[in-house]
Amino acid sequence: MTERIAHIALDEASVSRRSQEAEHERQVAMADLMGDNQFEPAGMQSGPYDVLLRIEEGRLIFDITSRQADKKTKVALSVAPLRAIIRDYFLICESYYEALKTPGPAKIEAIDMGRRGIHNEGSQLLQELLQGKITVDFQTARRLFTLICVLHIRQ
């Protein structure tokens, strides 16, 4: 399948130092994304694609290059609709990582279910925001949402 991401990178200049947990999430999301994804920018039917994700002036920017046609495009989205979900996701992740330090799987499982629910909500919203610009399946949206969260980490 050519309508996929072949390589993805985050603009490291816009990312602050990450915790071990955040770095692990980034690595897992990128590895999973490279293993399986559906990514079709509108008007560019000649993948696979190289993608650079960055934040610029409050906008999420997808810099996309087609490997087949050496064609480039840029897709920009406002991050405003995602901010509340990203904030909630960070809060529940903090609770999850704290819960991992204490014994008792019941609390961890409950927090993890909430974490997955918020992550799914962010992924669905991302798919909606990308509609008409980039077609992605739900799993690709989940992995991209994780990477977008990494771009928003401020320490």
Image (cartoon, rainbow, N blue to C red):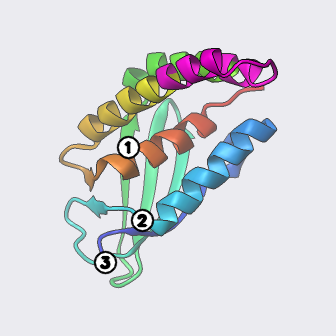
Q: Which residue does the image show at 57% across and 57% down from the upper left?
A: 30
Mark 3 element type = loop
- Of the residues under marks 2 and 1, which one precedes in the sequence? 2
| Image quadrant in which you'd find residue 92 | top right
| Residue type of the residue flagged with mark 3 | Thr
Q: Amino acid at mark 2?
A: Asp
Q: Residue 36: x percent and y percent?
A: 42, 65
Start and end of the magenta stretch? Answer: 95-114
Taking 61 as reference, is 99 above or below it? above
Report the disc number at residue 2: 3
Tell me the distance, in whole angstroms, between the alpha carbons under discs 2 and 3.
12 Å
> Label 1 belongs to which residue?
76
Q: Nearer the viewer, mark 1 or mark 3?
A: 3
Can I make out residue 18 in this image? no
Element marked by disc 2: loop
Residue 17 numbered mark, or none: none
Q: Position of residue 108 (x, y in %)?
A: 63, 21
Above/below status of 74 relative to 131: below
Q: How many marks?
A: 3
Q: CA distance from mark 1 to mark 3?
A: 23 Å
Local crowd size for mark 1, using a 10 Å CA cut-off: few (<14), some (14–19), many (≥20) = some
Q: Nearer the viewer, mark 2 or mark 1?
A: 2
* Majority SS type along the magenta span: helix
**Figure quadrant of the N terminus:** bottom left
Quarter of the rendering occupied by the C terminus: top right
Mark 2 or 3: in front is 2
The image quadrant of residue 94 is top right
Task: Please report the residue visible at 27 percent of the width from the left and 62 percent of the height from the top.
Answer: 40
